[in-house]
Every structure is written in structure tokens, then in C-alpha cells.
Image: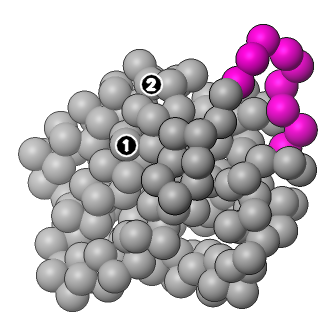
Amino acid sequence: IRQGGGCTVIRDSPAPDPAGLPELESLRMNRETLLELIEVRQSLEVSIATLAAEKRTDEDVAELAAIVREMEAAVGDDLEGERTDIAFHLALVAATRNKMMARLFDSIMTPMEQAIREVRRVELYANRSVAERLLAEHKAIFGAVAERDSAGAAESMKRHLRHVEGILTKYL
């Protein structure tokens, strides 16, 4: 059941054709906005990963480690996967100790949450292993931040966002 979107009943049958999923319609309808969001994420989140690696505290590392463990437990659970994905990115921005960065990030959270939700729902229908790949990407970002490797954190974030961009754009 989706507010304003009606009710969908899924029966035992082959996996739905990704081209017919309702989530894809909103991706297609907002193509320009989505492409702009990807550009913003690439600029902002690479900087966030870099700063987090430089400024993180032991408490930040512990929080990120806990979220990564939750992500591992959530593989295969779309809703929990969405929640932990967002929690990871929020904890990362908190680790920057930069209030302006946090405000900028907060300003894109609503469209980002929607994009994450749509990516997970669309791509998980097509390929269940994507959750494991997203987990590995988040682990790489976490590992670089924990090691205070700002260049590695930036590169890991770039790889992660390129993967997400690839998933999104193939459905536009």
C-alpha cells in the first residue's frame, strides 16, 4: 500500500519486469532533477568522505562500525537496507564536524532518500546481489575513514556513487 499510489498485490509468479515498476515512473518523470542530484551527491559526498576521514573520532568509527554491522544483517531486507544506507551517510556527514556541510547534506536528504528507495526497490527486483555490492562499497568507505585515509575514502565514495548512478541512469 502506497499513500496516493493505491494498493499492489503480489502473487507467486516470476519477478516483475523492471520496466513496469511504478518506482521507475517517478525516476523517469524527474530525470533532470535526478541527474542534478547525482552531480550534487558526487561533489558533496566525496568531500564528506574526505573530511570524515580527516576529522573522525573514535566514537564516529564505533557508530559507523555499528551501522555497517546493521547493513550486513539487513542484506535481503529492502526497508532495513534503506534505513541503514541513509543512517550510514548521516553518520558520515556528522563525522566531518562541519555544520555547513551537514546543512548542505540535509538539504538534499529528501530527494536522496527517494532516490535510494527507488534504486533499492528497482535494482533488487532485477538483481538481488546488488545489496551485497552496496554493502561492500559502504565497507570500503568505512575502512578508509577508520584508517584516516582521506584519499581512499574519496575514491571509495566515487566508486559507490558511480555504481548508484549507473543503476539509476539505466532506468531513465
Which residues are drawn in magenta? 10-18
Give the camera-side residue of 150 and 16: 16
Above or below 60: residue 139: above
Q: Please give the residue where the numbered disc 1 appears in the rendered image.
A: 83
Which residue lies under the disc numbered 2?
Answer: 74
Q: Residue at x 34, y 82 (%)?
A: 107
Residue 26 inside the magenta-drawn segment? no
Q: Which mark is residue 56?
A: none
Q: Secondary structure at mark 1?
A: helix
Q: Magenta segment: does it hold 13?
A: yes
Residue 66 relative to residue 152: left or right: left
Instruction: Name which quarter of the figure residue 66 lies in.
Output: top left
Residue that appears at 88% across and 19% down: 14
N-terminal label among 1 and 2 = 2
Do callouts 1 and 2 mark residues in contact (Cβ within 8 Å)?
yes
Q: Main secondary structure of the magenta part?
A: loop
Mark 2 surroundings within 10 Å by alpha-carbon count, few (fewer than 14), some (14 through 19), many (20 or more): many
Which class describes the residues within 10 Å of circle 1: few (<14), some (14-19), or many (20+)? some
Quarter of the figure that contains the C terminus: bottom right
**How far across and how far down the image is residue 121, in percent?**
64, 42
Position of residue 18 relative to residue 101, above or below, is above
Residue 135 shown left or right of residue 18 in the figure? left
**Residue at image x 34%, y 27%?**
70
76 over 20 or under it: above or below = above
Q: Is residue 172 left or right of residue 33?
A: right
Locate residue 3, reporting x and y percent: 46, 53
Answer with left or right where residue 69 lies relative to residue 41: left
Say which amino acid is labelled 2: Ala
